[in-house]
Image (cartoon, coloured by chain):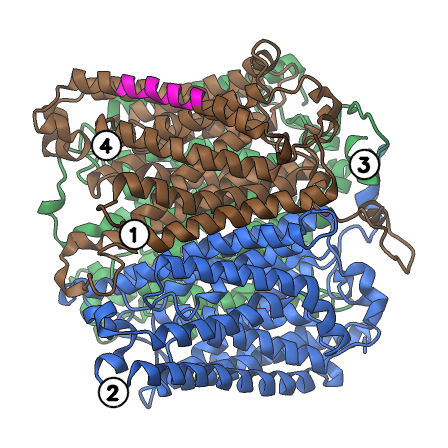
Chain colours: A green, B brown, C blue
Amino acid sequence: MARTPRHRRLVLPLLCLLFQGATALLFAVFVRYNYETDAALWHWGNHSNVDNEFYFRYPSFQDVHVMVFVGFGFLMVFLQRYGFSSVGFTFLVAAFTLQWATLTQGFLHSFDGSYIHVGVESLINADFCAGAVLISFGAVLGKTGPAQLLLMALLETVLFSVNEYILLSLLGVRDAGGSMTIHTFGAYFGLFLSRILYRSQLEKSRHLQSSVYHSDLFAMIGTIFLWIFWPSFNSAPTALGDVQHRTALNTYYSLTASTLSTFALSALTSEDGRLDMVHIQNAALAGGVVVGTSSEMMLTPFGAVAAGFLAGTVSTLGYKFFTPVLESRFKVQDTCGVHNLHGMPGLLGALLGVLVAWLATHEVYGDGLQSVFPLIAKGQRSATSQAVYQLFGMFLTLVFASVGGSLGGLLMKLPFLDSPPDSQCFEDQVYWEVPGEQEAEVQRPLRAEESVTHA
Amino acid sequence: MARTPRHRRLVLPLLCLLFQGATALLFAVFVRYNYETDAALWHWGNHSNVDNEFYFRYPSFQDVHVMVFVGFGFLMVFLQRYGFSSVGFTFLVAAFTLQWATLTQGFLHSFDGSYIHVGVESLINADFCAGAVLISFGAVLGKTGPAQLLLMALLETVLFSVNEYILLSLLGVRDAGGSMTIHTFGAYFGLFLSRILYRSQLEKSRHLQSSVYHSDLFAMIGTIFLWIFWPSFNSAPTALGDVQHRTALNTYYSLTASTLSTFALSALTSEDGRLDMVHIQNAALAGGVVVGTSSEMMLTPFGAVAAGFLAGTVSTLGYKFFTPVLESRFKVQDTCGVHNLHGMPGLLGALLGVLVAWLATHEVYGDGLQSVFPLIAKGQRSATSQAVYQLFGMFLTLVFASVGGSLGGLLMKLPFLDSPPDSQCFEDQVYWEVPGEQEAEVQRPLRAEESVTHA
Amino acid sequence: MARTPRHRRLVLPLLCLLFQGATALLFAVFVRYNYETDAALWHWGNHSNVDNEFYFRYPSFQDVHVMVFVGFGFLMVFLQRYGFSSVGFTFLVAAFTLQWATLTQGFLHSFDGSYIHVGVESLINADFCAGAVLISFGAVLGKTGPAQLLLMALLETVLFSVNEYILLSLLGVRDAGGSMTIHTFGAYFGLFLSRILYRSQLEKSRHLQSSVYHSDLFAMIGTIFLWIFWPSFNSAPTALGDVQHRTALNTYYSLTASTLSTFALSALTSEDGRLDMVHIQNAALAGGVVVGTSSEMMLTPFGAVAAGFLAGTVSTLGYKFFTPVLESRFKVQDTCGVHNLHGMPGLLGALLGVLVAWLATHEVYGDGLQSVFPLIAKGQRSATSQAVYQLFGMFLTLVFASVGGSLGGLLMKLPFLDSPPDSQCFEDQVYWEVPGEQEAEVQRPLRAEESVTHA
């Protein structure tokens, strides 16, 4: 499906300009500052303590922003010859998604009939949506071009926003850190997409689908930044006060436990007891995913540790045993193993949310019940009923993700979108000017490393 | 101009010790804690809500601090054999500038006749000055030694502080994020410097003036950290409340648009449609520069997107078409292309500030006018008059930068300063002990990658 | 001491599972949310301004968290073939330490007879303990396996917590940034450990105990992130208000000075004036260590600069002249030179604390004396007496560290713990599946860089 250079010169630019033009137009017509960001609507003196909300949310926003761009971007640099694309397409796709999600989420959440009003919450929510899109990107990493990815982001952002709106606003499902709305949705969207885009001849570029020493170290930058800021991710949109504290705390402990179980299982399942970087880079993060729904609840510190331990175990075993089956049996080629890091831990996290919601009582939550389960606090819903809604939310998310991902796959098969040929998947040169291709005009005897990089 | 080892052993150490000794002495005589940091002057109980200012500014300070050291430092690591110098000299020069700017800015802004009083704002302002110095460093990257750079920082910090003081304090020009004071000033200071230091024989080390695969990935660390924290950069010194919210928001959206236009233009202007890492690493950031002046104003979200789009376009075209002309016609060798990332987008940002100030009305800003345009709010100045002042500020900045950069260039030509020879520009070995130079005593058969790194 | 693969497959997993099981059990029995994180105990409305403490501490926590994982993790990636282990074992050991320190510190500091109550302070304190453990790791880097390191963390965390409790709670010693409790303790614990684990035949793997070009750049990521966030590290646990401001300010200036003196001394002590990356990566950070105790005090900005300058000087000279002696005379093999970065600057910092405490007066501190020296403010102790206590705290820390490190060394000699053989120290392949070992099934002509990475 590789096209002529002239064709390629036009598709991505035209798509970028078209998409940017459209969102700019919609911004002009619909997007306005909200009461906290508009000069005429906001004044410090009129605001009590709680109105410092911006200042309490802004650091979380920045942490989430780091995770989306540094975390996801560098985590995917593990491939030996796909670093430019991993970090570059992450950059492109996330930048577009931030604008587009501002619109799609804005129309659903803060449209007053005339305008969408944006503030710091808009930035956090748009970053969350970009997270889901990048999870899907992980499933098809190396097998898709930037124009395809932009189309994917266009569709996925809409479906993400609708699914999130139905769950959180219509059904009253709780999912602060997005076990369902972000991780389950993003993973299964990407997996169905990958199924539709299945390449029977991918073996031709298999030699490129592995890491080298330095690319694994770059990927660890992504892992570590995701790991350390995950407490901010899960707590970014929760109620202020004890809820935000508790969410950060639970996430922190869950991640420590998933790290320990990942190391244990990685060594245990290898032939000679040696650790596998793929597990450490990914499965160690499953503790953040698995408490995405329940970390705002009274999970207890022990519950967080236990959940994290389980998630790290399941995720590592998934990388070891299930990923090969996923390809051979189900014809799903999952480059980054998002099924192991986001899919299964996301579902586990949803189920854990069902359980913890079902156990919610007035005794345990006291007046704080209002912040976590407002419908139970108001007597409009029992804990059991909330648990059923949570479970239904999970299934609905799977439906949205699978239908959406399949549609997305068909969309991305449009022939003009310039997908890489089977023999050049996982290869930056298809889309990037890669240094070392042109012979450098060397004017002195080469040292060994130069003979490599210039050759 | 390369000197003997013995000479080189003395110049940098003596300069460091002299500069550090002088600033330490001035610190001892003049620098004191301000009322927020002095144990005897400050007590929590006496302070109302607004006095939590430290806590609202400190996260911004840390974000700016990340940008200066990680962002600028790693952005310049793109050269294949100049990574130690890029990140190392950034470190040295910025560390000195932080101390020196505390003094020069302190004398102008917080000197009470006896003492300079320092607090968290001093740290932010000093980091801003370091940003300007590092922009200038980008123009001469690879062609100057550390002793030269320290002298540059010495002079540039003084001129930066004076220019900033005249604009912000005397003329009432608004420039929170520094489109003029930081970007325009830093870029043209560096470009005039580079003009004076023009090397007609730079061709001799041209083979080193390019990237390799891994150095481009390191540079992307710089890009991404600059990109994600830029909302904090522009909003760090603004008034608290709606202004800070709005500034962050505008910067965020401007950057998403400059990213899309950079990808579009990079593919469109290449022969075969392939993306150029130089554009992505740099031009995608132009959206942060272009709203440096206007992001605190009622730019509107659409205005931010439009400005960012324009800046990314101009910047990418600059890299593609203007940088070669700058060298061939104007004899300005601009290693990092600071004219494209900071110069032109900085000027555009200044002009955008003129426009948005000119459009300021009491209706649009309400009581918030006081925070952004206090002189207009007090009736001491019309919007048109403010716009004229803004324009004058831009020209004054260009005068300061061009005269200062020229002086700086002459200063840096002092022969004892140990500049690298034409054939060894962009080469770490001139100033650093680089591993791989000594043959390792290998005691077992080499694998291929070791034969490279040890050779 | 290298064991069979089957043995290795079991030791680390069993240890991980055992440790995780035990801490999970203790979490279940003892760990509960504190009043700020429990839904039933906390409500926003009941809290005054000062109770926003979580929001003022959380950003500091995140900064410290970055330092522990990104900072320490990547700083140790400088070795050419030990990057996976450096960043991976940091991850494993720190994750375990965070849980275990929650328990050990909790029992000493927040145990109410039935439960340990955890909140954001617990996270900060646990990260501090992990910092000390990772400092000790630096001394034995490359010579120990992950199972040994887990045992080290188990013991060191207990002793760290006891030492910290005695100093801070029983003796009323001030040590906010941990010159004594973290740096001195961690360094000498690691050095005594290294003495016990002395390898007379380490020469066999000396060819691996050096850096390559890219590993030095990765290490600079660690350095820079440590450097920029150190103001948050030292101020994270201090009293809110002026104390936290002042601590951040002093640390910032101290680090700028240690950077300048490190560059000066590195060039001055080299034969040909070239800078040594080892110095820049490490000694430039000594300014953060040296004000760990005194930065919350009225050190004055000049005092901070002077202290930083001295620390950078001592540390660089230590790397140059003392590290070789440490090995040849004292049989202490200190891989990262923690004696130079944490040991000597830590002791200097403790002594500086003695001096500044001794100079404390009611005049200088005013009502703020209460926040820094509560026992002096209450009249229970004179400044001289406080100084004596500080000095005693330093000696006690040395006793704890030396006895503890020696015990730790004996513990880590347990034969089943799978330590690497002398000829394979500093080599990832012992514990990791390293890419490039298996021949890739290449299906097209290789370009030069691929012939390297696949060979």
2 vs 3, front mark: 2
Residue C315 percent location from the top left of the image: 59, 63
Q: Residue B195 vs residue B421: left or right?
A: left
Q: Are marks 1 and 3 in contact (CB under 8 Å)?
A: no
Magenta residues, dominant SS class = helix
Circle 1 marks a residue in which chain?
A: B
Of the 4 image quadrants, the one containing the N terminus of chain C is bottom right
The stretch of residues the image draws in magenta is: B390-403
Circle 2 sits in a helix, a strand or a loop, which is it? Answer: loop
Disc 3 residue type (three-letter):
Val
At a point 61% along the width and 67% down the height, the residue shown is C340
Q: Are marks 2 and 3 on the same chain?
A: no
Please rate how many residues cluster around mark 1, counting C-alpha atoms within 10 Å: few if below 14, some from 14 to 19, many from 20.
many
Q: Which mark is residue A452?
A: 3
Question: Would you say residue A300 sits in the magenta stretch?
Answer: no
Q: Which residue is mark 1?
A: B119
3 vs 4, front mark: 4
Circle 4 marks a residue in which chain?
A: B
Q: Are marks 1 and 3 on the same chain?
A: no
Locate residue A353: give its quadrant.
bottom left
At a point 38% along the width and 25% down the height, the residue shown is B290
Instruction: Give the Cα distance between marks 1 and 4.
Output: 19 Å
Circle 1 sits in a helix, a strand or a loop, which is it? Answer: loop
Q: Which mark is residue C380?
A: 2
Q: Residue A367 vs residue C183: left or right?
A: left
